[in-house]
Image (cartoon, helix red, strand yellow):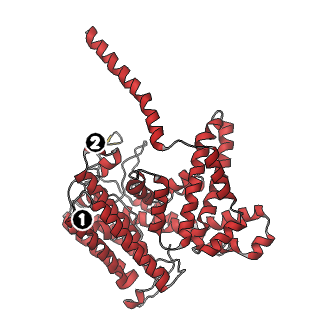
């Protein structure tokens, strides 16, 4: 969310943070190319790459946010001290509380002390990403140094950190120039492997030195992918600047609009008004992804056609978002790295009501505006209803391609309207306008989703997993008995 922030004029003559942000990101893009070509792991040491990446990141942060950027270093320094001074058994909990508390304190003071309602690229934006990184590292160290191997799932085994990061490695991971301003969050192991020049070191364990069945080749060039993503950025920015004033979201709560517009037209306008807000996110996140790719970071092996994939840390899939036929598909393709963080830190580890806990953590992480909490509380209800419909209704439409197509069209329309309905408070920020919008819709989606969740119950995840185990067990027993019979026959 990039509009304006205070603090830059304290140090630099340019006061518009939008300009500073774009200039820094373009400089970061050029610097990333230089970093890949002249500070390649084959030409210099990991120490030099860490130092350069960290110093450039701090410089860009100071340029954009002035002395507020020191919060990035302070937050990282405090949590690193916690990691060193406390045991690995509980440090992940302490780091989560302290990092999230520090972020929340900064967000609350910015909103309620300095300037309420500035929907802006303030210094807490980068702190949100750093908070993700701090907590991710803490939980991954806990997995790698305090838990047994058989207690981890496959993802946790892959991401587990087996040694304590050095101070330089930790600051480099949190504050490197490629992701200091707009992220995205990435795995610590992936970042260290990139700095050391071994991007498949920990991912090759399962493929025995091969990538999707192919022997490892030299690092492929990211130039084509960077150009494609920059073209996407240009188109997204052009679309946003062209249409952002045409369909303002605030019109959804305008008294004259509500009184004089038929309900079906209000539905169409809601969709169009929320659709016009997405290109700015497409621009920011795709540009951040391109910067990392230009530095050589983000290579994710090869696809089935042998073409290189540069989506290791991508934050969105635009076509999947616009054509999503379920709430889950939309969320899985929007702000992908944040979704991964929420899943790994909260959803997989919360013993009770993981869905509600995950939405609550997401609301706290986003900030102090009441609209965020209204959005994520609504999201809980819609998620439960969507899950119930998928489990109970979808199987009846899989009998023929025609029925499947009809189901996809209906669920696409329902998903898009539900998403727009959910995120209106996220844009309006305040309680009054948000409740006014929901009242104008008679809370119809809230009520409908609650009724669906009650009428179409879905068994909890742990019960579904238990039911699947007996189905697997007989096959294992039959396999063992067959092998025993063969041994006896032999």
Report which quarter residue 131 is drawn in.
bottom left
> In this rendering, does residue 137 appear at all?
no
Q: Eyeballing the image, is 337 above or below 400?
A: below
262 or 106, which lies in front?
A: 106
Q: Position of residue 242 (x, y in %)?
A: 63, 73
Report which quarter residue 408 is drawn in.
top right
Quarter of the image with the C terminus is: top left
Residue shown at the point (73%, 65%) measured from the top left: 266
- Mark 1 element type: helix
Residue placed under numbered mark 2 in the picture: 150
Residue shown at the point (39%, 27%) measured from the top left: 473
Residue placed under numbered mark 1 in the picture: 83
33 or 332, which lies in front?
A: 332
On screen, residue 476 versus residue 354, left or right, reads left
- Mark 2 element type: helix
On screen, residue 443 versus residue 317, left or right, reads right
Q: Residue furthest top?
A: 489
On screen, residue 59 versus residue 14, left or right, reads left
Q: Position of residue 170 (x, y in %)?
A: 26, 66
57 or 478, which lies in front?
A: 478
Q: Residues within 10 Å of mark 2 (few under 14, many from 20)?
A: few
State the CA–CA distance, disc 1 to disc 2.
24 Å
Q: Eyeballing the image, is 36 above or below 454?
A: below
On screen, residue 65 versus residue 4, left or right, reads left
Q: Residues within 10 Å of mark 1 (few under 14, many from 20)?
A: many
Q: Position of residue 97 (x, y in %)?
A: 35, 66
Lower position in the chain sequence, tag 1 or tag 2? 1
Residue shown at the point (53%, 77%) measured from the top left: 119
400 or 451, which lies in front?
A: 451
Residue shown at the point (18%, 64%) measured from the top left: 45
């Amino acid at each position: 969310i990039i509009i304006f922030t205070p603090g830059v004029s304290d140090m630099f003559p340019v006061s518009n943070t939008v300009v500073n942000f774009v200039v820094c990101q373009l400089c970061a893009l050029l610097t990333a190319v230089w970093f890949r070509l002249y500070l390649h792991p084959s030409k210099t040491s990991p120490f030099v790459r860490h130092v350069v990446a960290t110093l450039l990141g701090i410089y860009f942060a100071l340029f954009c946010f002035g002395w507020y950027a020191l919060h990035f270093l302070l937050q990282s320094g405090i949590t690193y001290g916690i990691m060193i001074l406390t045991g690995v058994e509980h440090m992940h909990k302490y780091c989560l509380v302290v990092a999230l508390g520090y972020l929340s304190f900064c967000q609350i003071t910015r909103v309620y002390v300095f300037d309420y309602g500035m929907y802006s690229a303030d210094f807490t934006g980068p702190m949100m990403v750093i908070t993700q990184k701090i907590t991710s590292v803490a939980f991954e160290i806990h997995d790698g140094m305090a838990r047994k191997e058989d207690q981890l799932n496959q993802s946790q085994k892959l991401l587990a950190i087996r040694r304590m990061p050095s101070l330089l490695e930790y600051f480099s991971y949190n504050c490197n120039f490629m992701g200091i301003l707009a992220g995205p969050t990435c795995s610590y192991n992936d970042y260290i492997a990139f700095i050391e020049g071994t991007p498949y070191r920990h991912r090759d364990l399962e493929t025995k030195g091969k990538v999707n069945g192919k022997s490892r080749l030299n690092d492929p060039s990211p130039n084509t992918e960077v150009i494609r993503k920059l073209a996407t950025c240009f188109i997204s920015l052009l679309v946003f600047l062209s249409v952002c004033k045409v369909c303002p979201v605030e019109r959804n709560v305008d008294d004259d609009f509500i009184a004089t517009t038929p309900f079906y037209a209000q539905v169409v306008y809601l969709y169009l008004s929320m659709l016009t807000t997405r290109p700015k996110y497409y621009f920011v996140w795709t540009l951040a992804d391109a910067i990392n790719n230009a530095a050589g970071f983000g290579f994710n092996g090869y696809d089935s056609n042998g073409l290189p994939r540069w989506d290791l840390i991508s934050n969105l899939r635009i076509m999947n978002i616009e054509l999503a036929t379920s709430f889950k598909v939309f969320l899985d393709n929007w702000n992908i790295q944040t979704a991964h963080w929420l899943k790994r830190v909260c959803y997989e580890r919360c013993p009770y009501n993981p869905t509600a806990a995950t939405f609550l953590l997401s609301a706290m992480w986003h900030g102090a505006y009441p609209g965020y909490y209204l959005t994520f509380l609504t999201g809980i209800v819609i998620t439960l209803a969507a899950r119930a419909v998928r489990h109970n209704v979808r199987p009846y439409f899989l009998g023929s391609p025609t029925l499947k197509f009809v189901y996809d069209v209906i669920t696409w329309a329902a998903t898009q309207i539900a998403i727009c309905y959910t995120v209106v408070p996220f844009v309006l920020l305040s309680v009054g306008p948000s409740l006014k919008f929901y009242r104008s819709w008679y809370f119809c989606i809230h009520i409908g989703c609650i009724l669906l969740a009650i009428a179409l119950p879905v068994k909890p995840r742990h019960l579904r997993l238990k039911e699947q185990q007996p189905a697997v067990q007989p096959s294992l027993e039959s396999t063992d008995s067959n092998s025993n019979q063969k041994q006896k026959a032999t």
